[in-house]
Amino acid sequence: MEKFNPEPKIKTLPDELYKKLDSYIDDLSVDRKDPRKKGNLIQVLHKAQGIFGYLPEEVQVHIANRLFLHHSEVSGVISFYNYFTTTPKGKYCVSVCMGTACYVKGAEKILNEFEKMLNIKAGEVTEDLKFSIDALRCVGACGLAPVVLINDKVYGRVKLQDVKKIVEEYLVATESEKKE
């Protein structure tokens, strides 16, 4: 297969994950000459992020080569859509809504408290990959302001003193998983 982009010298992610992604791409039967081939990009990026958890440069280059695209086309789509991430996320992704209603009701203080408790800033992940923090523009739950999401669980009307209890809930879950 002709490569548009040089592959990284060393791939840091497991081969079995690349095999899963390649199997998915193979099922799409992408034709190099088909002008609609770029139409597969978003669904492939969704699948790749589901497999790898994020879209680092080595995965982007791999996708670009498999879809006969330039890396710049792939990275452009990733940077345009907020859903895609190029940094790893924690097992527990803490998302603090910073929309107007949440911000007015103290979301910034809530975010700062999560950062202090987890010893990371928004956009970062803990060394053990258990927690990451994101600041979101709006989650559409203004009546529950301020709102915090941890993965798919919604916490509404969060107060500063709730942050410690919320973090401990996930630390306890992590400890019980270790015992099993």
Image (cartoon, rainbow, N blue to C red):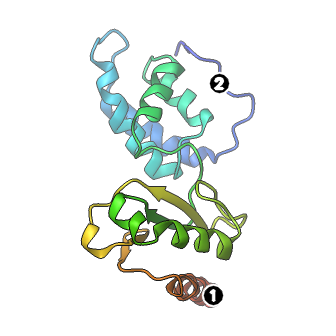
Residue extending farthest to the front is 104
The answer to whether residue 130 shows anywhere in this view is: no
Q: Are marks 2 and 1 in contact (CB under 8 Å)?
A: no
Mark nearer the N terminus (2 vs 1): 2
The x and y percentages for residue 164 are 58, 85
Badge 2: residue crowd in 10 Å (few <14, some 14–19, many ≥20)? some
Q: Secondary structure at mark 2?
A: loop
The x and y percentages for residue 32 are 38, 13
Tell me what residue is drawn at x 58 percent, y 63 percent.
132
Q: Residue tagged by mark 1?
A: 175
Badge 1: residue crowd in 10 Å (few <14, some 14–19, many ≥20)? few
Position above or below: 113 against 2: below
Q: Amino acid at mark 1?
A: Glu
Looking at this view, is 99 or 56 the one in front? 99
Looking at this view, is 70 or 80 the one in front? 80
Q: Quadrant of the C terminus?
A: bottom right
Tell me what residue is drawn at x 45 percent, y 34 percent.
78
